[in-house]
Amino acid sequence: MSEPSSISDLIANWRTIGEFAADVGCGYEAARKMRDRESIAPEHWANVICASEAKGVTGVTYEWLAARRVFDAARPGGVAAGPEKFPQAGTGHLSRSEAAE
């Protein structure tokens, strides 16, 4: 299988959301929200990576998941930000414009 282009594309590799939820070890509603929000919370990443590997889905890594992470501004402590607010993997620093924000 090729690398998924989105979270919903990743989840579509399972026959149902319920099967994805069971393989990842989360509830059905959590899995449905992951698909609808196009984002997976970091506490599920290790299980998603393992389940994807077991399913034969390639390219699902911590970096892949982080690039698709959407923060929920409505949640206490949440931040409205897209991937452009994060440094590229391996750079170890923010650009001057990002550091100034």
Image (cartoon, helix red, strand yellow):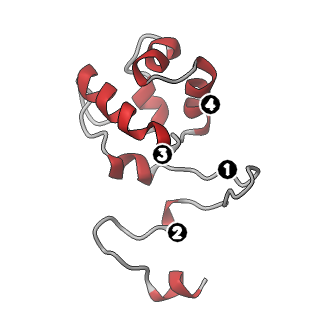
Circles 4 and 2, Cβ within 8 Å, touching? The answer is no
Instruction: Assess disc 4: are there few (<14), some (14-19) or many (≥20) residues with their C-alpha within 10 Å of its C-alpha.
Output: few
Q: Which residue is mark 2?
A: 85
Circle 3: residue type:
Pro
* Earlier sequence position, callout 1 versus callout 2: 1
Give the vertical position of 18 relative to 92 (above or below).
above
Circles 3 and 2, Cβ within 8 Å, touching? The answer is no
Secondary element under disc 1, as helix, strand or loop, is: loop
Q: CA distance from mark 3 to mark 2?
A: 17 Å
Q: CA distance from mark 1 to mark 3?
A: 13 Å
Q: Which residue is mark 1?
A: 72
Residue at 60% x, 27% y is: 30
> Which quadrant holds residue 13?
top left
Residue at 34% x, 52% y is: 63
Q: Which residue is mark 4?
A: 33
Circles 1 and 3, Cβ within 8 Å, touching? The answer is no
* Earlier sequence position, callout 3 versus callout 2: 3
Circle 2: residue type:
Lys
